[in-house]
Image (cartoon, rainbow, N blue to C red):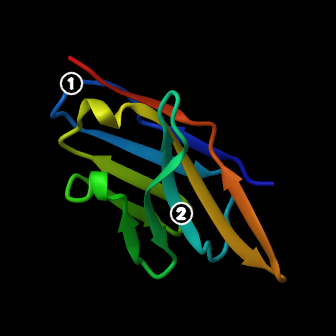
Amino acid sequence: QVQLVESGGGLVQPGGSLRLSCAASRSIFSVDFMGWYRQAPGKERELVAGITSSGGSNYADSVKGRFTISRDNAKVTVYLQMNSLKAEDTAAYFCNLWFWRGGSKYEYWGQGTQVTVSS
């Protein structure tokens, strides 16, 4: 079993920055995908950013140019640097990772960390 522990959320003013971190509870060899999702009240969970084992990344259109995802494979940790934050970025942010082993997909979620952008 793998637990994902998130940190870095909080309250920030519009235009400010936050850095989210998500670390796995144990070493995992070759994680195929690590990503961040968010869910605002009354809305569906959406993919914010994802990064593959080869370093390829993708972003939601709403965060392109403002957010940067990165990962440390040795630490099995994924980061999300969020700059120029807007009120509409307010949501619970969840990290996610998955990998294939022996023909089966293993997927794990963090417990969520709240990001609130408000003056």
102 on left or right of 110: right
Badge 2 marks a residue whose secondary structure is strand
Question: Which residue is located at x 41 percent, y 77 percent?
Answer: 55
User: Residue 109: x percent and y percent?
Assistant: 65, 49
Badge 1 marks a residue whose secondary structure is loop
86 on left or right of 31: left
For the residues labelled 1 and 2, say whether their Cβ atoms are less than 8 Å apart. Answer: no
Quarter of the image where the C terminus is located? top left
Label 1: how many Cα within 10 Å (few below 14, some 14–19, many 20+): some
Label 2: how many Cα within 10 Å (few below 14, some 14–19, many 20+): many
**Pointer 1 or 2: first along the chain:** 1
Quarter of the image where the N terminus is located? bottom right
User: Residue 110: x percent and y percent?
Assistant: 62, 44
Q: CA distance from mark 1 to mark 2?
A: 27 Å
Find disc 2 in the rendering and name its residue: 34
In this orientation, does residue 70 appear?
Answer: yes
From what the image shows, is residue 46 above or below residue 104? above
As drawn, the residue found furthest toward the top would be 119
3 on left or right of 101: left
From what the image shows, is residue 13 above or below residue 33? above
Find disc 1 in the rendering and name its residue: 13
